[in-house]
Image (cartoon, coloured by chain):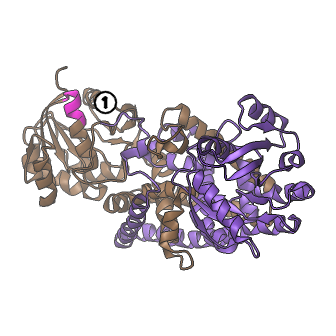
Chain colours: A brown, B purple
């Protein structure tokens, strides 16, 4: 096994992402020791019971003591307070990173608390499942997924390179991006789609003439594809939308315009326009398959291997 | 092997659904002989080459001669013309069914052409993939999926029961529903979600500041879940929206209202409202897993078995 990339890694928050990082760090031998903490006593107890990290401690201050890498894996809205809490306890030369889905708001909330001599290198792994909590993680979550590294003004190049190596060791491909562009790209690829999925699931739930049990039984016709992302952690997503308000509202505005154009084509019976539109969207799907970011197996492998 | 349910089955149209029916009929020994035809000579040639059915013929009239079951598996907008074409050639006592995603418009277009002594029993299997054409089918497509049987006024109960047994033999669960309720349920579970997915993919494609290659690379963050359904057959979907105009526009109107409420909550910073909303949508997802209409495997099994 290779030399660990960091001697001690502290995980602040022990949910799906931090838990998967712990599993993947062990798989790759990336850390000498892993400490972890979570605000909830219940979460800490579960993490302790399943041996998620080497040492579960009660406070973030304890967790970061002596850590070479500190990972903020809490909802975006809690990042600033955690940074303030840990600041006096950070080891000189340590790197602080995060895994938040929004970057400008995290940079603005965290950077002012980072002491001289400590490196701050934000990051965002583009991976997840509908599950959350300390039992949800697994070692391969980041395999062949992207992790965006978002250096800030003055980020030490060696600290950035080391964090990239670390994420590659966790299985991810890495790219660098600036915070504002990150937030726009994610508004398109993640934040707007999530809000839209939540909305469609809400509409189905409210409809009186179609029962929830009908929606559930007949979901394989398309609706099902919306529900995974609409089952994601509510606290995390509340914070994402509030923290990436501008870009999300921009994309949702464009989405509504575009939807109205298609609704009008349906109302006017403009079949040619609909056909052209639907033909163009196929190309993007093909690109995703070719880029290895999805499988083209019929039914996404959902049939659980019963496929002929 | 059990006795076939129908002596001769004629498939009009040889795409994903008809092709999967052919594979599943053979798996279950449900038909004595399968004939098939398609409007495109290229499709007929491929079907012939791969032996998709027992006999590929050039016209629908030839295909239905002597058939005990005739399956209309063409886009919804083409059903009326096909019914008119085959009507004089239908065997007395035969059953005509279809697999269209919209039922009221198909009933209105097809029923007037069905001769006395021939049974018309519309149906709709809720199954599909993003692939189309004569090579796309596979025998297990309908396994554990629902097929809605939509009897019309005067449908012969024995003919209905026989068609239900046939669909169960293809692997599906069956339910009966009337045409108008079918169209509303499908507008919620399928038609509106498809249009929304097409729209979101279109928005991503139009955005100048984010490149298509960025959208594709970073699609795993949520966008990917929209693209499978936005890659479905354009002709089929054009016809679905035009044929189920009222119910689709009704649901899209509700969707837009609801989306505006959530957009406003984001703009006003109403985190409690967002959190409550996102919490409620989780329950529907759990229902879908429990109903066996999806898997709760992390990442939908997309990682291709690399999961720990």
**Percent position of residue B244, x then y:** 72, 66
User: In the orientation shown, which residue stands out farthest toward the right?
Assistant: B88
**Percent position of residue B273, x then y:** 38, 73
The crowding category of the residue bearing disc 1, from other C-alpha atoms within 10 Å (few below 14, some 14 to 19, many at least 20), is many
The quarter holding residue A231 reads: bottom left
Q: Which residues are magenta?
A: A24-30
Report the residue marked by disc 1: A164
Q: Main secondary structure of the magenta part?
A: helix
Q: What SS does tag 1 mark?
A: helix
* Closer to us: B287 or B112: B112
The quarter holding residue A147 reads: top left
From the viewer's perspective, is residue A113 above or below residue B53?
Answer: below
From the viewer's perspective, is residue B268 above or below residue A16?
Answer: below
From the viewer's perspective, is residue B98 above or below residue B297?
Answer: below
Residue B282 at least partly seen: yes
**Percent position of residue A90, x then y:** 11, 42
Q: Is residue B278 magenta?
A: no
B91 left or right, relative to B167? right
**Percent position of residue A144, x then y:** 40, 32
The quarter holding residue B146 reads: bottom right
User: In the orientation shown, which residue stands out farthest toward the top?
Assistant: A2
A289 left or right, relative to B117? left
B96 left or right, relative to A241? right
Which residue is at a point 75% across and 76% down the rendered structure image? B153
The C terminus of chain B: image quadrant: top left
Which residue is at a point 30% across and 55% down the rendered structure image? A76
Which residue is at a point 36% across and 49% down the rendered structure image? A129
Chain of the residue on which disc 1 is drawn: A
* Closer to us: B261 or A301: A301
Q: Is residue A27 magenta?
A: yes
């Amino acid at each position: 096994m290779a030399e660990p990339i960091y001697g001690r890694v502290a995980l602040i928050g022990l949910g799906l992402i931090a838990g998967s990082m712990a599993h993947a760090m062990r798989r790759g031998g990336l850390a000498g020791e892993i400490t972890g903490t979570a605000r909830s006593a219940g979460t800490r107890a579960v993490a302790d019971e399943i041996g998620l990290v080497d040492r579960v401690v009660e406070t973030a201050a304890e967790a970061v003591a002596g850590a070479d890498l500190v990972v903020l894996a809490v909802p975006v809205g809690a990042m600033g307070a955690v940074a303030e809490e840990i600041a006096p306890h950070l080891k000189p030369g340590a790197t602080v990173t995060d895994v938040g889905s929004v970057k400008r708001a995290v940079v603005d909330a965290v950077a002012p608390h980072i002491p001289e001599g400590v490196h701050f290198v934000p990051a965002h792994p583009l991976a997840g499942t509908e599950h959350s909590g300390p039992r949800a993680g697994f070692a391969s979550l980041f395999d062949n997924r992207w992790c965006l590294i978002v250096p800030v003004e003055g980020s030490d190049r060696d600290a950035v390179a080391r964090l990239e190596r670390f994420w590659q060791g966790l299985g991810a491909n890495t790219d660098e991006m600036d915070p504002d562009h990150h937030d726009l790209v994610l508004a398109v690829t993640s934040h707007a789609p999530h809000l839209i999925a939540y909305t469609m699931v809400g509409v189905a739930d409210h409809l009186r003439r179609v029962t929830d049990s009908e929606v559930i039984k007949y979901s394989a016709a398309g609706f099902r594809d919306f529900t995974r992302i609409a089952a994601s952690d509510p606290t995390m997503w509340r914070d994402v939308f509030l923290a990436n308000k501008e870009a999300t509202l921009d994309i949702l505005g464009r989405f509504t315009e575009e939807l109205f154009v298609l609704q009008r084509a349906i109302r006017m019976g403009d079949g040619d326009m609909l056909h052209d539109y639907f033909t163009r969207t196929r190309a993007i799907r093909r690109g995703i398959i070719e880029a290895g970011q999805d499988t083209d197996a019929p039914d996404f492998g959902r049939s659980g291997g019963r496929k002929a």
